[in-house]
Image (tube, grey):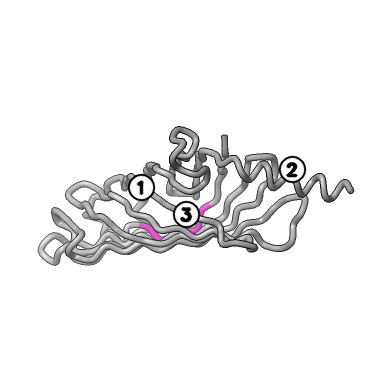
Amino acid sequence: MLKKIGLLALCAASAFAMHTVELNINDKDLEFGVKIDMGQFNEAADPDTVFVGAKLLHGSKENSDASSNRSLNDYYEFNFLMQRKVKATDLVIGLGVKLNGTKNYNSFPLGAEASYKLPFGEKMPLFLNGSIYYSPEVLSMQDAKNFLEYRVGLDLEVIKNGSVTLGYRTIDTNYVKEKGGDLNYNKSVHMGFKFAF
């Protein structure tokens, strides 16, 4: 009986989507991101389906392919994501678009995201996440040639609405040949916190 009540409470809690704030760090890089659930402001949008957000990454040359004489500017992005839960599973999939860049580099990558709640860890749920975004030359502006980003990560919910994250990211901000050519802006493992409210 207690298990059924707990399961019903968990399902009811998941019906109310939440905004998230995320902070990721390693020895050299600092990343801060925010996602706003539009379902909390607009009755036309279902909760946990439409998100807008922003992210800022202060990357280091140590985790980049940048040469010592090339400056590495902060990376920013504004993002939009629509997602849905696949029926009768713990899988959530989404499609998104971003406006991102650094100094003299901008692109509009399109991408996909997925999150899966692993079948173990009832007391502390564990989620496997992944995303990939790509911008071809036609969606790249200024000195940009193309853009590729992929991420994988694990989120362990240690307290209600609070998770510890561990992840890996690769961000390629490729420039036209005259402006420096291909550049891996950041390739690193990171850890941090994610809070929902």
Q: Which residue matches tag 1?
A: 79
Contact between labelled residues 1 and 2, with CB atoms less than 8 Å apart: no
Q: What stretch is highlighted in magenta?
A: 186-190
Q: Does the magenta stretch include residue 87?
A: no
Of labels 2 and 1, the one closer to you: 2
Residue drawn at x 31%, y 45% is 74
- Within 10 Å of disc 3 (Cα), the crowding (few <14, some 14-19, many 20+) is some
User: Residue 15: x percent and y percent?
Assistant: 61, 44
Which residue is identified by label 3?
A: 83
Label 2 packing within 10 angstroms: few (<14), some (14-19), many (20+): few
Q: What element carries label 3?
A: strand
Q: Earlier in the sequence, mark 2 or mark 3?
A: 2
Q: Which mark is residue 9?
A: 2
Q: What element carries label 1?
A: strand
Q: Can residue 41 be seen in this view?
A: yes
Q: Decide whether the magenta segment is chiefly helix, strand or loop.
A: strand
Does residue 79 sit above or below 114 in this rendering? above
In front of the other: 125 or 84: 84
Question: How many labels were placed on the picture?
Answer: 3
Measure how far apart labels 2 and 3 are at the Cα level.
23 Å
